Image (spheres, rainbow, N blue to C red):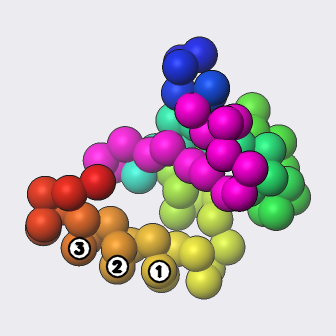
Amino acid sequence: MLLQRALVDAVTDYAILIDRDLTILAINNPLARSWRRGPEELVGRSLFDVAPPEVREVTLRRWQEALEAGKP
């Protein structure tokens, strides 16, 4: 978990690491703050339980495209 946290914290823009089920594994402070929460409140939760609606729609579409293409 420390490596995951270090990876997202190294990004100055928004960064999130999710698993195949869209569970948040790590999220950096800028993105968590934009959702008015702390990273510790978001890790372990489903992206769809905590992300704003416009984020959910775009993310689901991109996630499905990535899974179908077999690319990150």
Residue 43 makes an appearance in the image: no
Marks 3 and 1 close (CB-CB < 8 Å): no
For the residues labelled 3 and 1, the Cα–Cα distance comes to 11 Å
Marks 2 and 3 close (CB-CB < 8 Å): yes
Residue 2 picture location, percent across and down: 59, 16
Q: Answer few, some or many: residues within 10 Å of disc 3's Cα (few below 14, many 20 plus, some between 14 and 19).
A: few
Location of residue 4 with respect to 63 vertically, above or below? above
Label annotation for residue 65: 3
Location of residue 1 with respect to 13 vertically, above or below? above
Q: Answer few, some or many: residues within 10 Å of disc 2's Cα (few below 14, many 20 plus, some between 14 and 19).
A: few
Label annotation for residue 61: 2
Marks 1 and 2 close (CB-CB < 8 Å): yes
Residue 63 picture location, percent across and down: 32, 66
- Look at 48% across and 81% down and name the residue there: 57
Residue 20 picture location, percent across and down: 30, 47
Task: Look at the image and say whether residue 20 sits in the magenta stretch.
Answer: yes
Label annotation for residue 58: 1
**Which numbered disc flags the more N-terminal residue, 3 or 1?**
1
SS state under label 3 = helix
Residue occupying the far top of the picture: 2
For the residues labelled 2 and 3, the Cα–Cα distance comes to 6 Å
- Look at 75% across and 39% down and name the residue there: 39
Classify residue 38 by image quadrant. Answer: top right
Bounds of the magenta span? 7-21
Q: Quadrant of the C terminus?
A: bottom left
The three-letter amino acid code for the residue at tag 2 is Arg
Residue nearest the observer in this picture, 14 or 19 = 14
SS state under label 2 = helix
Residue 53 makes an appearance in the image: yes
